[in-house]
Amino acid sequence: MMIIQSHILLTMLSFFGAGLLLAFTPCVLPMVPILSAILAGEEKMGSKRAFQLSLTFVLSMAFTYAGAGLLAGYFGGTVQTALQQPWVIGGFSLIFVLMAFSMFGFFNLSLPRFLQNWMQSSSSKQKGGSYLGVAVMGFLSTLIASPCVTAPLVSVLTYISQTGDALLGGVILFSLSLGMGVPLLLFGLGQGALLPKSGPWMNKVKQLFGLMMLGLAIWMLSRLLPGTLTLFLWSALLIVGVVALGGFEFQPERRLPPLIQGLSILVFLYGCVLLVGAASGHDQVWRPLGSISAPAAVVAPADLFIQAYNMQDLQEKLDEAKKNNKPALVEFFAAWCGTCRDFDAQVLSDPAIQARMKNFTAIRVDLTTKNDALMKMIEHYRVFGTPTVLFYNRQGQAVPVQPFNRGVSKEDFDKILSKLS
C-alpha cells in the first residue's frame, strides 16, 4: 500500500487494491451471510434489485470506514478497541442469535410501526424503506463482524493518527472498504439471479441463513469462551444443522439433491470429528484432533512474558533490558481476542520461536480488563488492536517493523526476532 499525499488518486487506487486482497480474509467473509439474509427476505428479487441493495450495503460499509479514518486523523484514538469489549461482543452475539431464531420462524423481528410508516413515507419507491434498513445493517456489520483489527488497517490508522490528516484518513479508508466490498457486490448480483423465490426451497434457504447467523454468534463468542467449549459449539452447529436441513432424509419426495446430500453428510462427519476433539480437550477447529508429529512447546506462551501494568512499570522493564544489552518486545494482549489466542497457538507455542525469545526481554500488557493506567498506555503507544507487538533493539530504540502484514505469521515473526537477536 502506498500513502502519497501529493498523488491522492494513486493512493486511492493502491488502497482499493489492498481492499480487494482483504476481501478474502475473515474481515469480510462474515458479512456474506448477513447480506444473504437481507436478500433472502425480499419477496421479489431480480438481479437489478439485488445489486442495488448490495451497493447500498457496501457504500454504508465504506462510509463507516471513512468515518473511522476521519476520527483517527482528528483524535488519534481507536474505536475498534472499544468495540472488542466483552459486553459489546456478547451483546452483538445475542443479536445474531435472535436473528437466527427469526429465520427459523420462531418469531418475526420488525421495527416499531411508527418507524416503518416513517421510512415508507420517506422512501416511497422502496417497500418499507428497505434501502435504509440495508444501510443500517452495513453500518453495524462493519462494526461488529470484524475480528481483531487486521495488520493493514492498523498500519493505516497508525499513520493517520500520526499525521493528523483527517481528510486523507477518510479518503483512503473509503477506498480500502470499496475494494473489500467488490466481492460482496458480485455475490449479491449472483444471488439475486440464483436464489429461489418461492416453494419449500425458500424455507430451506432461510434455515441455512439462520444457521449462518448462529455461526457468526459462535465466531464472535470464540473471543470470550474457552477453545474447547467453542469447538463443542461448532460441532453442535454442524451436526444439528445437517439434521435440521434434511441431510438424512432419504424419501424420494423429501431428500436433497444427491450432491448436496453427500456434502451434507461430509459436514455431519466433520462435526462428529469436532465433537471428539472437544471431548479430548483440543481447541483448534482446523486441527480438532491435534497433531501427533508436532513437538510439544517448551513452556506455555504466557510464561514467556513478564507483565507490565502501567507506563512506569513498562519503562522500568525496558530500561532494564537496555542496561543488560538485550533486545525487548512488548505484546499488547487480551483474553477476549481470538487473534491473540491464534498467535499463542500458532506462533508463540513453536519451540524454535521460544528458543529465540530467550534472548529477549519479553513483556506482556494484558488489556483484558481496562483501567486508567492501561488506557494511558494504549494512547501513548497508539495501540489500535490486539495483538500489537512493539520491538526494541539492544540500545533501547523502538524498531519500526510490521510483523503481521500477512496475518499472524510465524515466518515473519521469526525473521524479526533473528534480525534483532
Image: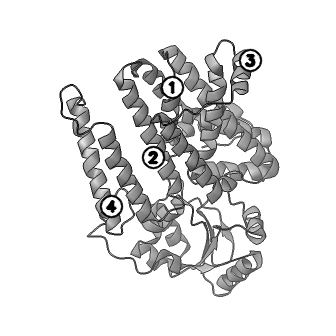
Q: Which numbered disc flags the more N-terminal residue, 1 or 4?
A: 1
- Residue indicated by mark 2: 215
Q: What is the spatial separation of the Cα atoms under label 4 and label 2, in whole angstroms?
A: 17 Å
Q: Classify the position of the N terminus by image quarter.
A: top right
Q: What is the spatial separation of the Cα atoms under label 1 and label 4, in whole angstroms?
A: 35 Å
Q: What is the spatial separation of the Cα atoms under label 3 and label 2, in whole angstroms?
A: 35 Å
Question: Could you tell me which secondary element the residue under label 3 belongs to?
Answer: helix
Q: Which numbered disc flags the more N-terminal residue, 4 or 2?
A: 2
In front: label 3 or label 4: 3
Q: Which numbered disc flags the more N-terminal residue, 3 or 2?
A: 3
Q: What is the spatial separation of the Cα atoms under label 3 and label 4, in whole angstroms?
A: 52 Å
Toward the viewer: 329 or 128? 128
**Circles 3, 2 touching at the beta carbon (< 8 Å):** no
Marking on residue 122: 3
Amino acid on which disc 4 is placed: Pro
Q: Residue at x 27, y 55 (%)?
A: 272
Q: Residue at x 73, y 39 (%)?
A: 67
**Circles 3, 4 touching at the beta carbon (< 8 Å):** no
In front: label 1 or label 4: 1
Q: Crowding at label 4, few (<14), some or many (≥20) Cα neighbours within 10 Å?
A: many
